[in-house]
Amino acid sequence: MKKLYLIAGVILLLAFQCEDNEPGAGDNCIDPDKINPSAACYEIYAPVCGCDGKTYANDCYAAAAGVRSWTEGACEK
């Protein structure tokens, strides 16, 4: 019976470790090690919506801001 409780406890702990990448997800969306304010990005407007809910001019600007993932197009408000 103790094994059953132990297995159930481990499953619950693993279930609560998952994080989503929805806007405002916070820590998991931005990689501080990838932030590069001096990045030389191209000046072509091709907006992307970052996982942080912000619209970036293009994927280069999103990557320079440390954003881990984005979708094509401006964010909907």
Image (spheres, grey):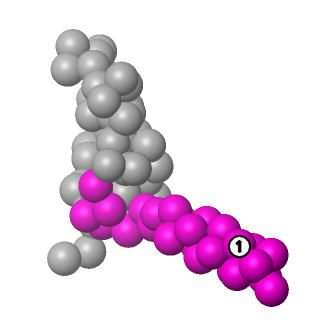
Residue 32 placement, left or right of 6: left
- Name the quarter where the N terminus is drawn: bottom right
Which quadrant of the view contains residue 31? top left
- Neighbor class of circle 1 (other Cα within 10 Å; few <14, some 14-19, many 20+) is few
Q: Can residue 29 be seen here? A: yes
Question: Vertically, is 33 above or below 61?
Answer: above
Q: Where is residue 75 in the image (x, y as percent from the top left)?
A: 28, 66
Which quadrant of the view contains residue 36? top left
Q: Of 24 and 11, which appears nearest the observer?
A: 11
Mark 1 secondary-structure assignment:
helix
Residue drawn at 33 percent across, 42 percent down: 30
Q: Can residue 72 be seen here? A: no
Q: Of 66 and 9, which appears nearest the observer?
A: 9
* Residue behind mark 1: 6
In the displayed orientation, state which residue is furthest to the bottom: 1
Q: Is residue 16 magenta?
A: yes
- Name the quarter where the C terminus is drawn: bottom left
Count of numbered tags: 1
Residue drawn at 32 percent across, 62 percent down: 25
Which quadrant of the view contains residue 20? bottom left
Write the start and end of the magenta stretch as one range.
1-26
Q: Position of residue 7 (x, y in %)?
A: 75, 74
Question: Vertically, is 60 above or below 71?
Answer: above
Q: Which amino acid does label 1 sit on?
A: Leu
In the displayed orientation, state which residue is furthest to the front: 2
Q: Of 16 and 72, which appears nearest the observer?
A: 16
Residue 12 placement, left or right of 48: right
